[in-house]
Image (cartoon, rainbow, N blue to C red):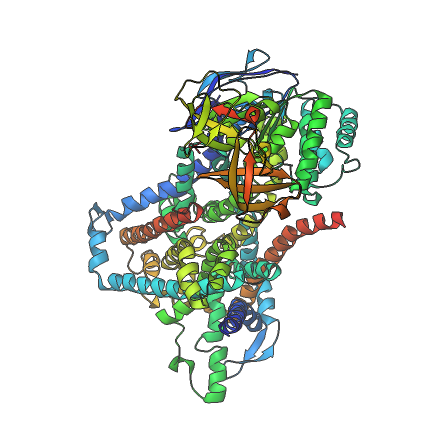
Amino acid sequence: MSEIKLENLSKKFGNVTAVDNVCLTVKEGEFITLLGPSGCGKTTLLRLIAGFEQPSSGCIRFDEAIVNEVPVEKRNFGMVFQSYALFPNMNVEKNIAFGLKIAGFTAGQIRERVKEVLGLVKLDGYEKRVPKQLSGGQMQRIALVRAIAPRPKILLLDEPLSALDAKIRVHLRTEIKRIQKKLSITTVYVTHDQEEALAISDRVVVMNCGRIQQIGTPVQIYNSPVNTFVANFVGSANLLKVRVRNRKCLTQNGLELAVSEIEGLQENEEAMLSIRPEFINLVDQNTTGTENTFAGVVKEIEYLGSVTRVKAQCGSESLMIDLKGEQIDLLPENHSVTIQIPAQKIKLLRIDNTLDAT
Amino acid sequence: MKTDLWKVFSKMLILLIVLFYLFPIFAIALASFTFQWNEYGLPIKLGFSGYKMFWEMGEFRRSLWTSLRIAPLSVAMTIIVVVPATYAVYISRSRLLKSIADVIITIPLCLPALVLAIGLLQSYGSKPFVLTGTIWVVILGHVVLSSPFMYRSVLANLQVIDTKTLVEAAKSLRAGSLKTLVSVVFPNIIPGIVSGSLLSFTTSFGEFQLARMVSGFMNQTFPVKIWEASRRYIRVQFAMSFIAILVSLIFFIIIIISLTRSQLKEEKIVA
Amino acid sequence: MKSHLPRKEILFIIPLTIFFTIIVFIPFIRIIAGSLLVSETKTLGLQNYVKLITTGAIVRSIKNSFLLSLWSTLIAGTIGFFFAYAISKRRERWRNLLVTINTLPLTISAVVTAYGFLVVFGDSGLVNGFLMYFLNSHISRFFNLLSIGGLIFVYQFFQIPLMTIIVASATSSMDPHIEEAARSVGANKIQIMFKIVIPHLLPAIIAGLSLLFINAFGAYATAFALVEANMNLVTLKIVSQFSDIGYDPGLANALSLLVVGVATGFVVLYRVSLNRIERPAK
């Protein structure tokens, strides 16, 4: 399996910089996801790796060898497209056999390998079906096994599940991960769905405006976002502008919060305070002695089944709070509540403009 | 209430237009089988004499074969010349190439068949480049007239099946350019080619002005002979006209059937 | 890497380019050159163009061709538009069938079309027969097929399908929910038609009208089959310059260039409108 190294990779389309000075190493056998909103450059980056686009500057290495000049057909990778791109004029067997024949498999080997990969995705017996007869999920699975059948060293997937229903998406992403793990193939996966990225990746590369915002494991980017963009894009976050006063954080309307990682910040310094909705607690009115307790008023309630999302007003600050289960009957609108924010769950981020850029 | 009025109106409009499209066909059919008209010009006796006369007159018979030779040849040449160019224009990233091809393909629109005929007559009518008097100049002229139909049809086909992504998929499976073209692109644009062939064939078969001006006496095409017949042999004229309609109609039906059959084949496999 | 791609694509364009050079460009140059050659004196000059503007018959033919093209285009444009719109409202099976039937007139030879109309609407045709039989009046009291008006009528046979094709492909890409949204806020059919549908389809309408005009202006066979040289039309005049009476190829070339000029003007309009359809201005 190949290791992929991207060194100072940039791509410009006219005046628009789609990929800006990206440096990334994808280890052998790793499952890495490029995550970001539409237009952030993740698909362009993937297509640069594939060779469908030429970099404006920088270089791409597969196992230390520079592949910038290597044509697509010689780069030895498998690709799964968002639209599946199954060849309409061929049945399933021929679609999979297409790459195998070029790779030099004999007729017997092809038949065996087709059977083998169809078994991997539990579509045994589908050899003679035509793409028109397949459902979206089936087409995606065929596209996947067509890509891996010739045993490529790299697997690239461009938002393969975007066109599918939610339930199928969840099921298929697990399949993809399972197969990837089994084959230990170096995989680069592109998606805008952060839940998907967190669920299946070894590491996640969060991108925005052509630039890498953060690289880390799912736990790292969720729990330790490095800037406001990552904090807000991966999961939800309540973001409050604060100023350091007496080793505590003061919000713009006077709420005072104790924060565990206050070291490293000067007095009067400004920062962005981030607290995830699921970490905010609603406590009994009479609780005393716990820090970071405030009075608030319930403004909106959304029942989402496993979670109840509450929007509460604390002075002039609006907070999103996620409560487990059905506490909805306890909270009529305009009901007064007491909010408690645990100091250890608060993250302090630099004030930057990553949030404003779309 | 207003929507009902519209519904009635639109249904009537559709009916009227379809009848309008069909009436000349029936009129010619009727005239072609008419043996005798009364003093009002209405047919009173039917017969096959028009067809008999046509069949017996060699020059008329030959013109049918001439057109039936010219039309398929011009369709074949149109495919050979236009389809690769259409593909190149579709897949190319060069804006220059796309603009050039765009202009070239738009030109037949600016040049009615008549102007083309005049140009060809004068350019290739005398030494040193004598082309007129052969069927080839007619064929070549017809290719020019048919090319917009083929181009439009094939281009639409390429776009609908997202050929760009299919080509990328083939490349990702290590296919070279030739293999991609032969195994992936070509099989999937056959519907577009077939559909373009319909209008290419009928345009060539029914074309009058160019054929009349440049084909010379030995190689007169069917429409030209129909017109000649109109001056001397009325019944033959109508018989030939109906034959012309039949040829177009038969080709039309063949193409429509083959296009819909491929759709039906897939539905059968599911069942 | 990018260097070898354009080379392959150029290869695909070469047959087309060579072909068009031989069959289109060279003859076109020949026409331009020929238009500057005055037939009587065998010298170069602009006399042919002068003749265009001064000769009464020629000027009349230009006027007639314009009238014929204008009216046949406007009428076919309107009918074709509503026909295409009506088709778009039908269910898919009917839509496909109607679109298919719509191409049928285009497969019929222009000459045959002329005779079809002649059989029915001509001076000794079927309609005349019925009129004489029941009303004892000749059709020429009401309608003369061999006139500009008659030609306008006959031209509908291939003009309506053309307009329908262009508008129908535009309606197929129109979101049906737009009209539903308008109805939900209370707009009636007429308002929807004029305030929403027509503006949205305007590029297709303009493209269609342009194409129709070019088609009518340059049409020859049908007019020739019906009226021969008895009517003044530009296309008929062009061909008559090559006959034994009044052999004037120079004039024919000049007239041809006029036709090309008119066609080019409308083709530009047509292409610009097509681009608007594919890339709507935001």
Tell which residue pokes out farthest to the top in this image: A64
Q: Say which of A73 and C42 sits in front.
A: A73
A37 shown above or below B250: above
Q: Give residue A71's quadrant in the image.
A: top right
**Image location of residue C223, percent across then percent down:** 40, 64
Direction from residue B220 to residue A331 in the image, left or right: right
Q: Is residue A148 visible?
A: yes
**Image location of residue A293, percent across then percent down:** 53, 33
Q: Give residue B177's quadrant in the image.
A: top right
Q: Is residue B180 visible?
A: no
**Image location of residue A209, percent across then percent down:** 45, 28
Instruction: Name which residue lies at 65% across and 36% down.
Output: A86
**Image location of residue B156, percent across then percent down:** 52, 45
C125 shown above or below A181: below
Q: Say which of C264 and C218 sits in front.
A: C264
Number of labels in the image equals: 0
Instruction: Name which residue lies at 39% across and 22% down.
Output: A268
Q: Say which of A280 and A90 sits in front.
A: A280
